[in-house]
Amino acid sequence: MTEHRETCCTSPAAVCYWFTVSLVAWGALSLMGIYWHPLRALSAVTILFAMAIGCVANWIRNRTLHCAITGPLFLIAALVFLLLDVTRTHVNNLWVWPLVLIGVCVAFLLEWRYTRLSAS
């Protein structure tokens, strides 16, 4: 039997869990970056993939609403940067980062709105 869990809002424990999983994922991806250049430690690809992994883990464990939105958003942004890095195509970063920032803000606003409505 599957257990149905409600979506919840961000808590300090959920943020700590997300940060820990993201940090471990970043470390593992950075080690792979020693052998494959696009995953070097300080690349946007590595950081965004690590954040996406943290969001997926946080969604599975804590069901934080914004992680259901930001996880795929970070994954898509990482894939865009990876594609640009691998194909050596040049696109101005000012096209990608504002969309990521807007998506994160929308995700947190939706979570805030959802928790206000569910508290009423």
Image (cartoon, rainbow, N blue to C red):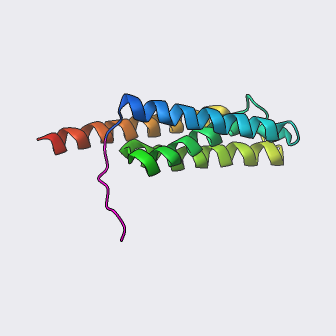
Q: In terms of depth relative to the viewer, which is nearer, 24 or 37? A: 24
Task: Residue 50: name its quadrant.
Answer: top right
User: Does residue 109 appear anywhere in the picture?
Assistant: yes
Q: Could you tell whether 59 is left or right of 75 in the image?
A: left
Start-end of magenta stretch: 1-8
Instruction: Give the mark count.
Output: 0
Q: Give the answer, above or below, for where 23 lies relative to 78.
A: above
Q: Residue at position x 70%, y 38% from top? A: 46
Residue 97 image position (x, y, % from top left): 58, 34
Q: Residue at position x 73%, y 28% from top? A: 42
Residue 110 image position (x, y, % from top left): 31, 42
Q: Residue furthest left?
A: 120
Q: Could you tell whether 9 is left or right of 72 in the image?
A: left
User: Does residue 91 appear anywhere in the picture?
Assistant: no
Residue 98 image position (x, y, % from top left): 53, 33
Q: Residue at position x 86%, y 43% from top? A: 36
Residue 49 image position (x, y, % from top left): 64, 42
Q: Residue at position x 82%, y 47% from top? A: 86
Considering the image in quadrants, where does the N terminus appear? bottom left
Q: In terms of depth relative to the viewer, which is nearer, 117 or 12? A: 12
Q: In terms of depth relative to the viewer, which is nearer, 74 or 67? A: 67
